[in-house]
Structure formats: C-alpha cells, structure tokens
Image (cartoon, rainbow, N blue to C red):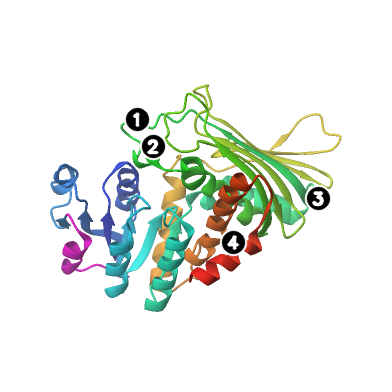
Amino acid sequence: MTAMRLIVVGLGARAQTWLKVIAANPDVTIAGLCDPDPAARDRLAGQYPKAAIGADLSEVVRAGGDAVLLCTPPAGRAAQFEVCCQHHMAILAEKPLADDLATAGRYVAMAEAAGVPLIVGLNFRYLAVTQETIRLFATGTVGTPEFARFTYERWRDGTLGHLNKYPLTMEQPMLWEQSVHHFDLMRFVYGAEPVRVYARTFNPSWSMYRGDANVSAIIDFDNAMTVNYQGTWQGNWDRLGFEWRTECTRGVVVQRDMFGRLGYARRQDTELHDVPLPAHVDWITDAAALLASFVKTWRGSTAPQCTGHDHLRSLQMLEACVISSGRGEAVELAEIRQDAIKAG
C-alpha cells in the first residue's frame, strides 16, 4: 500500500516529537520540511536528504505531497490552509486550530469547501486511560456519571528550550493551549455537549505569562452532567497536580495522572480498584495512534476523528469562558454558536 507523503510545517519543539513518531510509521514518509528559520531547516537537512526543504509551504509543495502536518503556532495559519486546499492535501493541525473562534471557523469552512480532510491533533483522546474511562461508564461499573471535578495544576516555565514560546504572549494561554485538551476530553468521555459555562480567568502576580494563566469554570452539559474545572500553568509548586474525579450513581471513577493511573470505587469500598492499562510512552504512543488514524482517514478506510468541525465545539467552550469572565455571569453556549453562524 502506498505510503502517505507528508510535509511537516513548523520545525520547533512539537515537531521534534512528531518526527520520531513519523519515523516509526512505515505508512508515512517525509516529503517536505518547512520553517521560516534557516537554522531550524539546517538542523534537519542532513537527516532528510530526499525531502524538499524551504521557508514557505508554497515553495515546498511544488515537490509533491499528500498531506500536511501543521506544527505551527495557531496564529497566522491562513496562507498555509490556502495552500493545502489549493493542492487538495489532507491536513493534520496541532491544536488549537486558530487563536480565535471566528478564524477557526473560516478554516473549517475552507477545508470543507475544498473537500480536504481536516483533523486536529487532540492526542489525549487516544490514551488508553481515556478509552478505559469510556468503557467503565459504558459497562455501568459504577453507574451513571452525574458530576465531576477536574484539576490541573502545573508550574509551566515557558522559557525552557523544549517548549514553544508563543504562549508567553497569548491573551489566554491556559485556555487556548491547555484547557482546550481538557474540554475536548470532557465532551469525548461523557459523550455530551456543553450548554452553559460560568467561568473566571485571571493571572497570579508572579506569572511569567502576559495573558491569563488560570481558569476556573463550572460547565453544564446537555446530559445533566456538571464539571467543576480548575486549571493553571502558574501553580507555585514545580510538580504536576492532576486529578479527574467523576461522581456516578453507584461510585466514582478517578484518573490521577495525565497519562494514566485510573481507578474506580463503589460507595462502600475502602480504596480504589486500579484499572490495568497497557504500557505507554508519554507523548509518543498517543501521537502514534493519532497519526495512524489520520493515515486511515487519508486513505478513506475509516471515518475521520477529531475533525475541525468537531473541534469548533471545544473552541466555543473557550470563547464562553472568556465572555463569562468578562461579564461575571454564566454564558449559554447557544449564544456562542449563534454568533459563530452569523460570523460564517
């Protein structure tokens, strides 16, 4: 079967992980590498002698390609989307699709009009812990989910060399770069859509980020599920705090690590029952599964997952948080969706 010829756009921190994943997938070959920074291009030129390398996608695409992986910052992707659509190349884009809802909506419409598959890199959907959580709910092991608490507390030093730098100057770095994953997981795991958000975003005095690094929100879903969410990139202890606890009609399900440690308990249990999970390499195993799914979508053998259209639902949650924080009151998601329709 013919391998996908993939062009990687943006050769920064995230691309280094993707290149490892691509190298391990026999169904994908690197057709091109693209970055405006000559130093970034030079670092990889020797490793990929057969790949077209250039500063701009419009140059690199002349050498041919089937699909594009966008590892670029969410701001300023318009020209890249135009080239992909003009050349009918499938798109796998790092989240978020754009740094505002209206722009993301235009990208989705552009891809749909061109008949181009558009997949967003929501790799946490592919974690074994995510799949097992869904299974626990489906089997009724602890009953039906009704409410949850989701906490993510991190000291993210945005100046470190292996991290992207653009979040340092974003208006809502926590929301648009991190919470977007969490909100997508809520929708995916609970099989529900948000209907109402009451939120506050803010910045602690010691924050290195220009925009708000803290998010607190209460989110109501259309299946009567309610989630109390707290996320920060400037928690003042350099140790990741993660817990996602879902209260169900006969017990609880608790995820205690971003990549694993899943357990459940019924009401009278004295401790959690650990759920066995397969071996996992952080950031690699999940990205490999996402890439494999993308290849199947490109070949037409499976329906697309994590589509741009679906991603807009999560971005609407981010927008609702910003509006709610500004107003100091709850925001109905119907208002955000109606505004998006008018903008489109």
Q: Main secondary structure of the magenta part?
A: helix
Q: The N terminus appears in which quarter of the rendering?
A: bottom left
Q: Which residues are magenta?
A: 55-65
Quickly name the residue at label 2. 168
Which mark is first along the chain, 2 or 4?
2
Magenta span contains residue 316:
no
Q: CA distance from mark 3 to mark 2?
A: 42 Å
- Which one is closest to the eye, mark 1 or mark 3? 1
The secondary structure type at the circle numbered 3 is loop
Q: CA distance from mark 1 to mark 4?
A: 34 Å
Q: Position of residue 227 (x, y in %)?
A: 70, 46
Which mark is first along the chain, 4 or 3?
3
Q: For mark 3, does the 10 Å Cα neighbourhood hold few (<14), some (14 to 19), or many (20 or more) residues? A: some
The secondary structure type at the circle numbered 4 is helix
Contact between marks 2 and 1 (CB within 8 A): the answer is: yes
Residue type beneath disc 3: Gly
Q: Residue at x 13, y 53 (%)?
A: 49
The dot on residue 143 is 3
Quickly name the residue at label 4. 336
Which mark is first along the chain, 2 or 3?
3
Q: Is residue 162 left or right of residue 109?
A: left
